[in-house]
Image: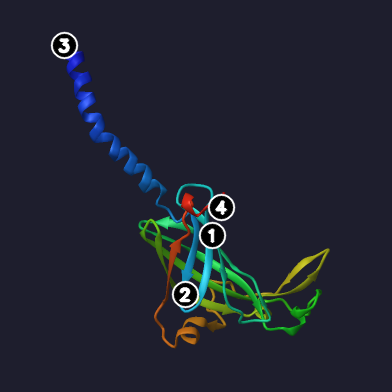
Amino acid sequence: MRIHILQLFGLLIAPAVLPCLAQQDQSNACTPEGTWYGGSVVAYFMTIVPAGADGQFTATAQPMYKNAVMSTGYSGSMKQNGNVYEGPTMSLTTQDPAYSGPPPFPNLPDLAVGWMSLEMLDCNTIRNTLPFFGQYLGASIWKPGTPWTGIEWLPNPKIPLVSPPDVDLIPILTGDTRPIVETYRRLPRSVNPALLHK
């Protein structure tokens, strides 16, 4: 009799528990992993992928603007810290016209370095706050090396995120000292079947 009561109890409880388990799966999927579009004054697309242990991610972002002779996209890493994902991001950038042609180059690029603090507002919206965004001049860090020696590192170079930057970019870009805030929307992971050509 007790076995039948437990079975009946299981049949009555299962319908109530299964939606909770499904919700748990949905909440686990609510991470920053994915492809995003957004920004603030300028537009970016960003891709975030898991990296190693739980709560660690790699982020790459491509800006939709040109402010240098040549610059790379931004790349960085984030680690979950409570409800936010935090970490560094960096781009190489130069105003040297020599970079319009092929290498070798007489100088190495500057580093544009930021600190990301990303918060998920919901599963499809994130807010990224940059409380630090600075430029480190390449001339204070490195010189071109050779294919046989690698980069020539300057003695006592500035260390990004440790040393003060040569240029604090936040006041220059915003006219203010408040952190830069960006918002992004997730690119959906599936397509509406009605949109597919057949």
Of the two numbered discs 4 and 2 on the same chain, state the one appearing first in sequence: 2
Q: Mark 2 or mark 1, which is nearer the start of the sequence?
A: 1
Q: Camera-side residue: 196 or 33?
A: 196
Q: Residue beneath label 1, please?
A: 47
Residue 184 at x, y percent in the picture: 44, 66
Query: In which quarter of the view is residue 21 placed?
Result: top left
Q: Which mark is residue 197?
A: 4
Asked if residue 76 is positioned above or below residue 172 in the image, the reply reads above
State the CA–CA distance, disc 1 to disc 2: 21 Å
The colour mode here is rainbow
Tell which tag, 3 or 2, sits nearer the viewer: 3
Query: Marks 4/3: CA distance?
Result: 59 Å
What amino acid type should be assigned to the residue bearing mark 4?
Answer: His
Q: Earlier in the sequence, mark 3 or mark 2?
A: 3
Whole-percent x and y of residue 120?
38, 60
Q: Secondary structure at mark 1?
A: strand
Q: Does the residue at mark 4 contact the one at mark 3 (Cβ under 8 Å)?
A: no
Whether pointer 4 and pointer 1 mark residues with C-beta atoms closer than 8 Å, the reply is no
Q: Is label 1 or label 2 in front?
A: 1
| Residue 122 x %, y % | 35, 58
Give the residue drawn at x 41%, y 48%.
Answer: 29
Which residue is label 2 attached to? 132
Give neighbour class at mark 2: few <14, some 14-19, many 20+ (Cα, 10 Å). Answer: many
Q: Secondary structure at mark 2?
A: strand
Mark 1 or mark 3: which comes first in sequence?
3
Q: Splitting the image into 4 quarters, where does residue 90 fall?
A: bottom right
Q: Which is more toward the observer, 173 or 1?
A: 1
User: Mark 3 highlights which residue?
Assistant: 1
Say which amino acid is labelled 2. Phe
SS state under label 3: loop
What amino acid is at disc 3? Met
